Amino acid sequence: MATTPPTVPVPHEPLPAAPTPAGATAPLGRIELLCLQLDDQLYGLPLQLIQELRPLQAALPLPGQDSAALGVMNLRGQVITLLDLRRLLGLPCAADACRQRAVVVLVQQNRHLGLVVDAVVDVLQARPEDFRSLPPGFSHGWLRGLVLAGDRQVLLLHPGA
């Protein structure tokens, strides 16, 4: 029996301009996105949400959770939930794609979350005019839009509220 990916409510307000942290090099008006890879597709997360990148480590499974919830991990004394981005998006796990995996630790509204991805690619500096809406009728709790920057097509992720 196939499971449907969990949906997470996503506010539909415009993406705010990223604040420029000390030492950042984003030109004014640009939004920095951390580009992640699943198979041949790139996904982007606003860099301001990222706390750190870590190699995948064993998670403590919690019984009765959705299949996307891999469990919890100890991050310097703080327990954070690990979610598999592939499973959240309803993508199969090809054996070769799942060998090298990374954890992207997000912080949003004082909540920590670990997203397990195939690879972290780079940081993309996107301009406001690079952002596009998803096609009408298409809805997914974790996808917010599309970024077209040069020859790159990056699906914009939004971890929800």
Image (cartoon, rainbow, N blue to C red):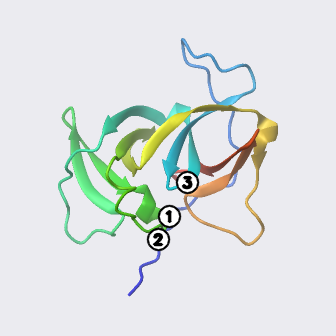
Q: Position of residue 25 (x, y in %)?
A: 62, 16
Q: Badges 2 and 1: C-beta atoms under 8 Å apart?
A: yes
Q: Badges 3 and 2: C-beta atoms under 8 Å apart?
A: no
Q: How far apart are marks 3 and 2 (CA)?
A: 20 Å
Residue depicted at x 65% and y 68%: 139
Residue under numbered circle 3 = 40
Of labels 2 and 1, earlier in sequence is: 2
Q: Crowding at label 2, few (<14), some or many (≥20) Cα neighbours within 10 Å?
A: some
Q: Where is residue 143 in the image (x, y as percent from the top left)?
A: 60, 57
Residue under numbered circle 2 = 5
Q: Distance between the residues labelled 2 and 1?
A: 6 Å
Residue depicted at x 51% and y 62%: 8
Q: Crowding at label 3, few (<14), some or many (≥20) Cα neighbours within 10 Å?
A: few
Q: Position of residue 102 (x, y in %)?
A: 36, 43
Of labels 3 and 2, earlier in sequence is: 2
Of labels 3 and 1, earlier in sequence is: 3
Q: Crowding at label 1, few (<14), some or many (≥20) Cα neighbours within 10 Å?
A: some
Which of 35 and 39 lies nearest the eye of the viewer?
A: 39
Amino acid found under the numbered disc labelled 1: Leu
Residue depicted at x 34% and y 62%: 95
Residue 148 vertical position relative to residue 85 in the rendered view, above or below? above
Instruction: Inspect this view and state whether residue 21 appears.
Output: yes
Amino acid found under the numbered disc labelled 3: Asp
Q: Circle 1 — which element?
A: loop
Q: Badges 3 and 1: C-beta atoms under 8 Å apart?
A: no
Residue 91 vertical position relative to residue 2 in the rendered view, above or below? above
Amino acid found under the numbered disc labelled 2: Pro
| Front disc: 3 or 1 | 3
Q: In this view, does 70 lie to the left or right of 51?
A: left
Residue under numbered circle 1 = 89
Q: Which residue lies furthest to the top in this view?
A: 23
